Image (spheres, helix red, strand yellow):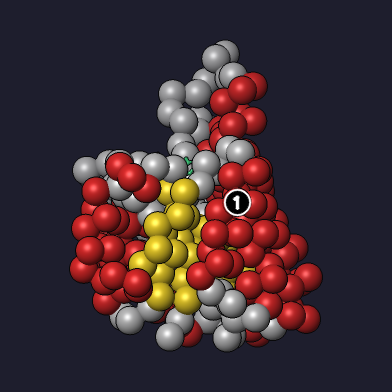
Amino acid sequence: MRKVLITGANRGLGLEMARQCLEQGDRGFAACRNPQDAAELLELQRHHGDGLTLVEVELADDASIRQALETVGQHTDGLDLLLNNAGVMPLHETPETLDGATLDETFHINCTAPMLVVREALPLLRRGTQPKVLNISSSLGSLTNKTTGGLYAYCASKAALNMLSRTLAHDLHRHGITVVAIHPGWVQTDMGGPRAPLEAPEAVRGILQVAATVSLQQSGQFLTWEGEEHPW
Ligand code: NAP
């Protein structure tokens, strides 16, 4: 049975990841800030019992990340899939109004925290079966595709996440751990908004298909939810 850890699992893409992983028979660890208020996750847990463990994590807090992975380690010897999904996207940035704290916080949640989650999950990933890390990035982190201004913190943090993913892929190759950055598509969630062309179930089906099929030889790539290479 595949063991999967998902961050940002209480809503949006993360919640749909938890739902589909459980449908596929995975053992799930759903990390979010307030598990006691995560109504949909609690409903999933009622349905799947021991198949789903809710784990509290505040990604802005290193100690909370350490504690969360300790909790996961109390329930399993290994992890096969880490879906580093949680993210934030501040809007309405202009060169005149750029705010240092917003930039720092966005970098922390979108690229520092995923790296710290990997660091704390490493002992479990090393004991996993064909272990994989999927860092949920964005086409907005692509330098090649950047043809408009704005979204400074978000775009730059996802570009940094892409570089961190590629660097990590080199270092973890010897442990047999595959690392990829993945663009999930433009999806109808709180972040994606109602005009997005994709709904979460379709995007997540693609992401989980990539998770199932991506190989160690592909480690370090930037892929789309459809499994195609995304321009850097
Ligand atoms: P979303 O609906 O806004 O959900 C974001 C998730 O991240 C929530 O569960 C949120 O938890 C969690 N999160 C934010 N800050 C956190 C923190 N400090 N500690 C713990 N959890 C935190 O976004 P989404 O659309 O599902 O996006 C998921 C991922 O896909 C993100 O990385 C996003 O950048 C990426 N993405 C999305 C789209 C799209 O069109 N939707 C496109 C490209 C990339 P709370 O409920 O506690 O805030």
Q: Is residue 165 above or below residue 170?
A: above
Mark 1 C-beta to ligand 1 under 8 Å? no
In-image side of 27 versus 125 (left or right): left
Q: Is residue 165 above or below residue 127?
A: above
Residue bearing the label numbered 1 = 67
| Towards the viewer: 210 or 11 | 11
In-image side of 129 versus 138 (left or right): right
Tell me which residue sits at (29%, 70%) in the image. Answer: 49
Tell me which residue sits at (43%, 85%) in the image. Answer: 1
Can see residue 192? no
Locate residue 4, reporting x and y percent. 47, 71
Q: Is residue 173 above or below residue 161?
A: below
Image quarter of residue 28: bottom left
Can see residue 151? yes
| Towards the viewer: 96 or 72 | 72
Locate residue 187, reporting x and y percent. 31, 53
In-image side of 119 versus 23 (left or right): right
| Quadrant of the snapshot with the C terminus | bottom right
Locate residue 48, reporting x and y percent. 26, 71
In-image side of 56 versus 66 (left or right): left
Tell me which residue sits at (33%, 81%) in the image. Answer: 25
Image quarter of residue 126: bottom right
Q: Residues within 10 Å of mark 1 (few under 14, many from 20)?
A: some
Question: What residue type is disc 1 on?
Answer: Gln
Locate residue 181, reporting x and y percent. 56, 63
Q: Is residue 129 above or below residue 120?
A: below
Tell me which residue sits at (64%, 22%) in the image. Answer: 100
| SS type, badge 1 | helix
